[in-house]
Image (spheres, rainbow, N blue to C red):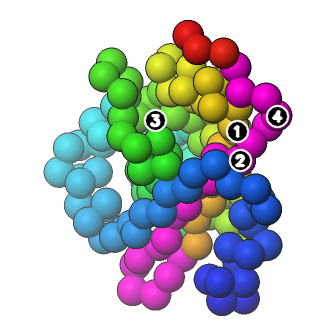
Amino acid sequence: MDITEYLRCSVPAAVHSAGVDLVDLRRWDLAVARTRRAVLRRAFSASERAAAMCAADGELTPARILGHTFGIKESVVKALGGLPPGSAYADIEVGTGPPEQDGGGRPVHLRGELARWAARHGVTLTGGTRELADDMAVAWVVAAPTGTPAGPR
């Protein structure tokens, strides 16, 4: 399945906004090593880190799984038009699991100002990643309408 087919079967028909990120997994691995894994503690919840540990298998390390997840978080920031003041990557929690190979998406849960944005716009977020050649991956997120947007807050 090529990337076009993958996105066609993964993205909802109605989309409020979307974000895409290209993840250089070699650079990600270097950032994890350079920060002595501090980037993992800053950007991911304990449950995201634990899920990556459980999903790891031989070649697919927890750090590499979290590299894919970070791409989804970057895509959220792009779909929302930026990270609001007082927000952090840890306010974006991506559903657990290894990178998708079957076209399925992962739910994205938001906290704080990001959750208020989603409520105001009446959207839920779903994201995913797809491994490309040469240690690269594409990550995406779509904000799809859930019904009636909430009033101003």
- The alpha-carbon separation of the residues under discs 4 and 1 comes to 10 Å
Contact check, label 4 and label 3, Cβ < 8 Å: no
Near mark 2 (Cα within 10 A), the count class, few <14, some 14-19 or many ≥20, is many
Secondary structure at numbered mark 3: loop
Tell me if 86 is positioned left or right of 8 in this view: left
Q: Of the residues tagged 3 and 1, which is closer to the observer?
A: 1
- Report the residue marked by disc 3: 44
Expressed as whole percent of the image width and height from the top left, the position of residue 61 reads 49, 60
**Dot 4 lies on which element?**
loop
Residue drawn at (42%, 63%), measured in percent from left and top?
Answer: 21
Front: mark 2 or 3: 2
Magenta range: 131-150
Q: Left or right: where does residue 106 sit relative to residue 25?
A: right
**Hey, what amino acid is under mark 4?**
Gly
* Residue type for callout 1: Thr
Q: Which residue is mark 2?
A: 144
Q: Which mark is residue 124?
A: 1
Asked which quadrant contains residue 130, the reply is: bottom right
Left or right, 120 with reference to 105 = left
Q: Which residue is drawn at the image coordinates 65% and 84% (left, top)?
A: 4
Badge 3 or badge 1: first in the primary sequence: 3
Mark toward the start of the polypeptide (4 vs 1): 1
Q: Badge 3 local density, few (<14 within 10 Å), some, or many (20+)?
A: many
Please tell me which residue lies in front, 88 or 57.
88
| Residue 89 locus on image (x, y percent) | 40, 34
Q: Position of residue 83 (x, y in %)?
A: 36, 34
Identify the residue under disc 4.
147
Q: Residue at x 51, y 34 (%)?
A: 92
Magenta stretch encompasses residue 141:
yes
Regarding mark 2 in the picture, which secondary structure is present there? strand
